C-alpha cells in the first residue's frame, strides 16, 4: 500500500524535525541538514509501517526466513525508500517550495558499501523483493564502521582510502538498546560425565556484546518492510579501573578496543580467501548474535523449540556464516538439552546454503587449531559432526577411504567450510543453471552422488525496480506507455515489450532514451574532469577486478584496435568509448597491474588528437552502487567475458541487458540463460564453452602456441613489453605467456582472443544499422523478464524455505 501522506502533512513533519534537531526553519536549513531531516522523516514513516507489518506477522504465526550474509551492498536508501513508499512526488514538491532540489539531496547520502560486489549486492536486491512481496523475512549482517575502501588512482596505481560512511549513513540505523546478546570467544571447554550423560563446562572465555542496529527497507507498493539487522560489537563493561588508576591507560582501554575491532572494517577481498583471525571472529560474531536472537524470538513467541524448523528457515549466503550450523547445535545441545541426533536433524531441517563461487582460492578452509583456540565448544561440535558424517559414509561406502577423505569436514588439520555447509543443510544451490551443474558434476560431485536431493539451482536476479524504474526513468516512462505498470510488481510482464519490436517509433524512442542517458552520464563525468563523447559507443566492463573476469582480454582487444588505427588512421570504425570500472583487492598485485595498464593506455591514447576521436579508454574511479545506477542506463555494450565455467552467475550482465545494452560475452554463468532469453540473434557470444575449457586443459594448454601462430596475438602481446605512456608492462607480458606454471595465464585470454576480436567486429557492423541495433536492444529489455530478483525469491520461498507471503 502506498503511503497516503499529503504534501502538507509532510511539510509539517519535516519542519517540526528541523526545529527539534537544529532549531531552524526550512528556509534556513542547508542541504546536509535537509537531507538528514528528510531521511529521519522517512525512517519515522517506515517505523510506523513496520509496527503494523510486524503485528500482522506475529498474528499470522508464519514461518520466517533469516538471511545471513557477511555483506550487504545497500547503496543509497533515500531514493529507494521514497520510490517504494510512493512518496517521491510529495517530497519533491514540498522541497521545491523551500528551494531544494530532491535530486541534489540524494547526492548528500553516502553509499552504504557494506559489501564487496556480487554477493552483497544480490543480498540487498533480495531484501527489496522480500519486503515487496511481503514474505516474513529478516537479514543479518555486521555494521562495519568502514565499508569497502574508496578507490583513488594515482598515476595508474590504485590507492585505498577508508570509507567513512556513518556520518550521513547513520540516519538509517535504529539502535536497539533494548536488545543485546553476548558472544563468547576463547577459553576452555571441559567435558563432564553426570548422571544425565555428557555435559560441557565452558570457562575463562572473553565476552563481547552484540548490539543490533536495524535498517528498514520498504517494500514497493506493498505493506511489507524488511529489516536488515546489523550487529555492532561493544565491550561488555569490564573497564579495568585498577590499570587506569595506576596510569596504565593503554591497558585500561585494551579490552574495549579489542571488542570494537570486530566490526571495524569489511575485508576487501572478493573471491579470495585469506585466513585472518579477525575475519573468523567477525564470522562467529555475526553468527552467534543472530542465532541467539532467532532462538530467543522463537521462544518468546512459541514457548518451545520443538516447532523450530517448522517456523524458521535460516539461509547462509556462501560459507562465511557457516558457523551458524555448530552454533545452533550448541544452543540446542547445551542450553536446551536436545540429544545429538535431534539437534542435528533440527539444524539440518532449518538451514539452507547458497554457493557463489567455484574458484578454488575462494573456498574457505580454516586451520583446526585456530578454531579450537577461538571457539573451543564450536570446534568440539564440528568434530562431532565430522565423525558422525564420516561414519555414515563409511557405512554407505565401506572401504572407500579416498572418497570419505574427500568428503570429510576436517582433513589435514583444516576445516572445509563448504563441506560443513552441505552436511548441515537440507538444500544446496548454485546461482545459475551452468554453475549449479558444475557444482553437481565437479566441485561437490561426491556429495551430489550421496545426497542428490539436496542440490538445486536458483538463478540470480536483480531488483528491477531499482535498476530500471529508479535508475532509468526515461525507459520506465516508455515501458509504462507501452505495457502498463504491471511489470513493476511482476517482472515477467516485461516480456510484453516484445510486441513493439517492429514499431519504428518505439525503436527510435529507445535510441533517443539511450542517447539522453549517455549525455547525462557524460555530464556527470564532466564534473569530475573526464570528457566523454556521448555520441561514441559506450562499451562497458564494470565489476570487481579479477583475473578470471578477464578485464585484460578486453584491454588486449582495445590495444589491437589502437594498433590498427595507428597503422591506418582512416580506418572506418565508429567512435567508441571503453569504460572500465573496477576495484582490485588491495593485496592483489596482478589486478592492480591491469588497472595500471588501462590507465596508461588511456593516457597514451589521450595524447593523440586524431586517434582519441575514434577510441577512448576511461577508467572510472571508485565504482560503487551509486555509480552503477548512472552507468547501467548509459551502457550500450555489456562486456561479460569471463573464462567459461568461472563466473558463478554475474548480475551486472542482467542490469545492463535490462537497460537495453547488448551483451558480448562467453557462455558462462547467467550469460547462458541470457542467451536463451534473447535468442542467438540478440547477443554476441564468443570463445570456448566450459566444456571446451576442460578439454583444452586435458589436451594441454600452451599460450605460446597462440603467440607464435596468430599474428594479431603476437603483435598485441609484444606491445605490452614496449609499453604505453612510457611504462612497460613486462609483468603482464610474462603472465600471459609463461604464468605460474609455464603454460601461460590460467584464464586463457589468448585462447579466446581471436574469436573475441572477430565477434566484436561483427558487433560494430550491426551497430551501424541503428534500426537493427535498437530492435536487439528491445529484445534484451523484454528478455530481462526472467531476471527479476522477485522471481529468484519466489523460487527460494517455494522450493527451499517453504515460506508464504503474509495475507
Ligand atoms: C572468503 C573470501 C571471499 C569473499 C567473497 C570469497 C567469496 C566471496 C563471494 C562469494 C564472491 C562473490 O561475490 N561471488 C559472486 O556472487 C554473485 C552473486 O551470486 C555472482 O553473480 C558472481 O558471479 C559471483 O562471482
Image: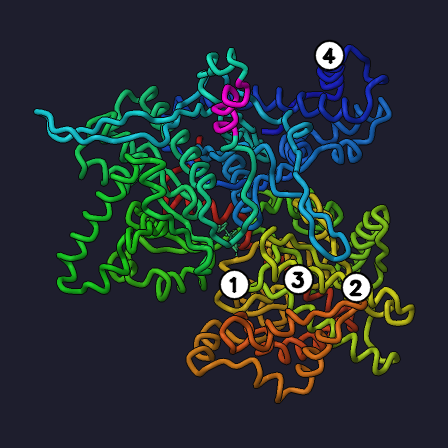
Q: Which residues are magenta?
A: 248-260
- Front-most of residues 240 and 633: 240
- The residue pinned by badge 3 equals 593
Q: Is residue 250 magenta?
A: yes
- The residue pinned by badge 2 equals 602
Tell me whether circle 1 and circle 3 mark residues in contact (CB < 8 Å).
no
| Camera-nearest label, 4 or 1 | 4
Tell me whether circle 2 and circle 4 mark residues in contact (CB < 8 Å).
no
Sequence-first tag of 2 and 3: 3
- The residue pinned by badge 4 equals 16
| Camera-nearest label, 1 or 3 | 3
Badge 1 density bin: few <14, some 14–19, many ≥20, Cα 10 Å: many
Q: What residue appears at the point 54 percent right and 43 percent down from the top-left corner?
A: 267
Judging from the image, what secondary structure is the residue with disc 1 in?
helix
What is the C-alpha distance between the residues marked 1 and 3? 32 Å
Tell me whether circle 3 and circle 4 mark residues in contact (CB < 8 Å).
no
Amino acid at each position: 500500500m502506498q503511503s497516503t501522506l499529503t504534501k502538507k502533512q509532510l511539510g509539517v513533519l519535516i519542519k517540526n524535525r528541523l526545529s527539534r534537531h537544529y532549531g531552524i526553519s526550512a528556509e534556513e536549513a542547508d542541504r546536509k541538514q535537509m537531507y538528514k531531516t528528510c531521511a529521519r522523516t522517512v525512517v519515522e514513516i517506515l517505523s510506523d509501517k513496520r509496527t503494523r507489518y510486524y503485528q500482522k506477522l506475529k498474528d499470522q504465526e508464519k514461518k520466517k526466513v533469516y538471511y545471513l550474509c557477511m555483506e550487504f551492498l545497500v547503496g543509497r536508501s533515500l531514493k529507494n525508500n521514497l520510490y517504494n513508499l510512493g512518496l517521491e512526488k510529495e517530497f519533491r514538491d514540498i522541497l521545491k517550495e523551500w528551494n531544494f532540489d530532491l535530486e541534489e539531496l540524494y547526492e548528500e547520502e553516502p553509499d552504504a558499501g557494506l559489501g564487496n560486489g556480487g554477493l552483497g549486492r544480490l543480498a540487498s536486491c533480495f531484501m527489496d523483493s522480500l519486503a515487496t512481496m511481503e514474505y516474513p523475512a529478516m537479514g543479518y549482517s555486521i555494521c562495519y564502521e568502514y565499508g569497502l575502501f574508496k578507490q583513488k588512482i594515482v598515476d595508474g596505481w590504485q590507492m585505498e582510502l577508508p570509507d567513512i560512511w556513518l556520518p550521513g549513513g547513520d540516519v538509517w540505523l535504529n539502535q536497539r538498546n533494548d536488545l543485546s546478546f553476548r558472544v563468547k570467544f576463547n577459553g576452555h571447554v571441559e567435558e563432564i560425565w553426570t548422571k544425565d550423560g555428557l555435559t560441557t563446562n565452558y570457562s575463562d572465555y572473553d565476552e563481547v556484546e552484540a548490539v543490533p542496529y536495524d535498517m528498514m527497507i520498504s517494500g514497493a507498493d506493498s505493506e511489507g518492510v524488511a529489516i536488515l539487522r546489523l550487529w555492532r560489537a561493544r565491550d561488555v563493561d569490564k573497564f579495568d579501573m585498577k590499570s587506569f588508576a595506576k596510569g596504565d591507560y593503554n591497558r585500561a582501554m585494551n579490552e574495549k578496543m579489542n571488542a570494537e575491532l570486530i566490526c571495524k572494517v569489511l575485508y576487501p577481498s572478493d573471491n579470495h580467501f585469506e585466513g585472518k583471525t579477525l575475519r573468523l571472529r567477525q564470522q562467529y560474531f555475526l553468527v552467534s548474535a543472530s542465532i541467539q536472537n532467532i532462538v530467543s524470538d522463537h521462544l518468546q513467541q512459541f514457548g518451545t523449540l520443538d516447532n523450530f524448523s517448522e517456523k524458521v528457515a535460516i539461509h547462509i549466503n556462501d560459507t562465511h556464516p557457516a558457523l551458524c550450523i555448530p552454533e545452533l547445535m550448541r544452543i540446542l545441545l547445551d542450553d536446551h538439552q536436545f540429544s545429538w541426533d535431534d539437534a542435528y536433524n533440527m539444524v539440518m531441517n532449518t538451514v539452507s546454503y547458497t554457493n557463489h563461487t567455484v574458484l578454488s582460492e575462494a573456498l574457505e578452509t580454516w586451520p583446526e587449531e585456530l578454531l579450537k583456540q577461538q571457539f573451543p565448544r564450536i570446534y568440539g561440535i564440528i568434530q562431532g559432526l565430522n565423525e558422525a558424517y564420516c561414519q555414515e559414509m563409511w557405512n554407505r561406502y565401506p572401504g572407500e577411504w579416498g572418497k570419505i577423505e574427500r568428503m570429510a569436514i576436517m582433513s589435514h588439520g583444516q576445516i572445509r567450510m563448504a563441506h560443513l555447509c552441505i552436511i548441515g543443510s537440507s538444500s544446496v544451490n548454485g546461482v545459475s543453471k551452468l554453475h549449479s551443474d558444475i557444482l553437481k558434476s565437479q566441485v561437490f560431485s561426491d556429495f551430489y552422488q550421496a545426497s542428490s536431493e539436496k542440490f538445486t539451482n536458483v538463478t540470480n536476479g536483480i531488483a528491477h525496480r531499482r535498476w530500471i524504474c529508479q535508475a532509468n526513468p526515461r525507459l520506465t516512462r516508455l515501458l509504462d506507455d507501452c505495457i502498463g505498470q504491471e511489470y513493476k510488481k511482476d517482472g515477467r510482464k516485461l516480456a510484453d515489450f516484445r510486441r513493439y519490436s517492429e514499431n519504428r517509433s518505439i525503436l527510435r524512442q529507445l535510441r533517443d532514451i539511450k542517447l539522453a542517458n549517455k549525455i547525462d552520464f557524460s555530464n556527470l563525468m564532466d564534473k569530475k574532469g573526464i570528457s566523454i563523447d556521448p555520441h561514441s559507443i559506450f562499451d562497458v566492463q564494470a565489476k570487481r577486478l579479477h583475473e578470471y573476469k578477464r578485464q585484460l582480454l578486453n584491454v588486449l582487444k582495445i590495444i589491437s584496435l589502437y594498433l590498427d588505427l595507428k597503422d591506418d588512421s582512416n580506418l572506418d570504425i565508429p567512435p567508441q568509448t571503453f569504460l572500465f570500472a573496477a576495484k582490485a583487492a588491495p593485496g592483489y598485485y596482478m589486478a592492480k597491474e591491469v588497472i595500471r595498464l588501462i590507465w596508461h593506455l588511456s593516457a597514451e591514447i589521450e595524447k593523440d588528437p586524431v586517434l582519441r576521436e575514434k577510441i577512448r579508454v576511461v577508467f572510472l574511479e571508485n565504482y560503487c552502487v551509486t555509480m552503477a545506477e548512472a552507468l547501467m542506463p548509459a551502457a550500450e555494450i555489456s562486456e561479460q567475458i569471463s573464462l567459461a565455467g568461472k563466473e558463478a552467475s554475474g548480475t551486472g550482465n542482467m542490469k545492463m541487458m535490462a537497460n537495453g545494452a547488448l551483451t558480448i560475452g562467453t557462455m558462462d554463468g547467467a550469460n547462458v540463460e541470457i542467451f536463451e532469453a534473447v535468442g542467438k540473434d540478440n547477443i554476441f557470444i564468443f570463445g570456448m564453452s566450459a566444456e571446451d575449457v576442460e578439454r583444452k586443459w586435458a589436451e594441454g594448454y600452451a599460450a605460446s602456441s597462440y603467440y607464435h601462430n596468430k599474428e594479431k596475438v603476437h603483435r598485441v602481446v609484444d606491445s605490452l613489453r614496449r609499453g604505453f605512456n612510457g611504462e612497460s608492462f613486462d609483468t603482464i607480458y610474462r603472465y600471459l605467456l609463461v604464468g605460474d606454471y609455464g603454460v601461460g595465464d590460467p584464464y586463457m585470454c589468448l585462447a579466446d582472443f581471436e574469436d573475441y576480436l572477430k565477434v566484436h567486429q561483427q558487433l560494430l557492423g550491426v551497430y551501424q544499422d541503428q534500426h537493427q541495433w535498437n530492435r536487439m536492444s528491445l529484445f534484451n529489455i523484454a528478455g530481462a523478464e526472467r531476471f527479476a530478483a522477485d522471481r529468484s525469491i519466489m523460487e527460494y520461498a517455494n522450493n527451499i524455505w517453504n515460506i508464504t507471503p503474509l495475507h
